[in-house]
Image (cartoon, rainbow, N blue to C red):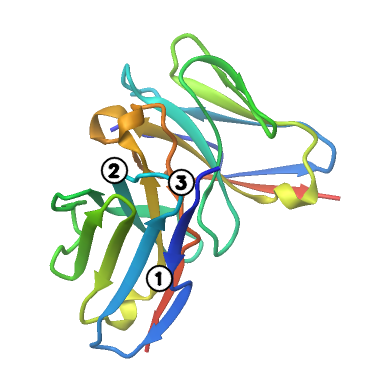
Amino acid sequence: LAKTTQPISMDSYEGQEVNITCSHNNIATNDYITWYQQFPSQGPRFIIQGYKTKVTNEVASLFIPADRKSSTLSLPRVSLSDTAVYYCLVALYNQGGKLIFGQGTELSVKP
Amino acid sequence: GAVVSQHPSWVICKSGTSVKIECRSLDFQATTMFWYRQFPKQSLMLMATSNEGSKATYEQGVEKDKFLINHASLTLSTLTVTSAHPEDSSFYICSARDARGGGGTEAFFGQGTRLTVV
């Protein structure tokens, strides 16, 4: 199974760009990389997903190098409400897209 | 985005009783559903995977006779915690995706169910 490794915690200030890098050395050919955000006592919320290169949506960008062994979630101009736990996951293609959660990154945004 | 609804949002039950949690996909057909459990300050732990019309596949260490999963339709999966004990108190979260879209189809999560066994 593709295990992910990411920093346990990060601190930032309002208005800054935050980049969270995740390593997934054992990612398989058909697996996708996906990121979720979770607030306390809520289910995870989908942020972004990609296979390779760069993906951008209205809330974030995802950078994936050619070897796909890592990825970086970029949150532009964070606000206090972005304080949450961010999970990097590999969707296991051969297991129906199963998502195995790692420990996540606890992002704290300060004023 | 797609919506996955769980019911109830919270439940308190007596030790020894059974509790059923429902997970519904409201605007898409969920061919695959996943059930997770999350303890305070910890990450989500996958309990089982269920495919519509098939028996659930349980992760190692999860008792299939204690956590009964039914996925009888493309929009509904249920998790029944049988003979609940205080150590079963946790936050239970379901996730659903339409696997027919291939590996690139994202999974959507319910809002979670807080179970407290007293």
Q: Return the disc, 3 or 2, that comes first in the chain's sequence.
A: 2
Task: Pinpoint the chain carrying mark 2.
Answer: B
Which part of the image, by quadrant, shows the N terminus of chain A? Answer: top left
Instruction: State the image coordinates of residue B36 (x, y, percent, origin top left).
Output: 35, 56
Q: What residue did someone put label 3 on?
A: B108
Q: Residue at x 51, y 51 (%)?
A: A44
Type of residue at label 1?
Answer: Ser
Secondary structure under the numbered disc 1 in the rendered image: strand
CB atoms of marks 2 and 1 within 8 Å:
no
Q: Residue at x 83, y 43 (%)?
A: A14
Q: Residues within 10 Å of mark 3 (few under 14, many from 20)?
A: many
Q: Return the disc, 1 or 3, that comes first in the chain's sequence.
A: 1
Instruction: State the image coordinates of residue A20 (x, y, percent, origin top left).
Output: 61, 32
Q: Residues within 10 Å of mark 2 (few under 14, many from 20)?
A: many
Type of residue at label 2?
Answer: Thr
* B14 lies above or below A59: below
Task: Pinpoint the chain carrying mark 3.
Answer: B
Q: Return the disc, 2 or 1, that comes first in the chain's sequence.
A: 2
Secondary structure under the numbered disc 3 in the rendered image: strand
Q: What residue did someone put label 2 on?
A: B31
| Front residue of this view, candidates B3 and A13 | B3
| Front residue of this view, candidates A42 and B110 | B110
CB atoms of marks 1 and 3 within 8 Å:
no
Secondary structure under the numbered disc 2 in the rendered image: loop
Task: Pinpoint the chain carrying mark 1.
Answer: B
Task: Left or right? Give the position of A111 relative to B32.
Answer: right
Q: Residues within 10 Å of mark 1 (few under 14, many from 20)?
A: some
Task: Left or right? Give the position of A107 relative to B51.
Answer: right
Q: What residue did someone put label 1 on?
A: B90
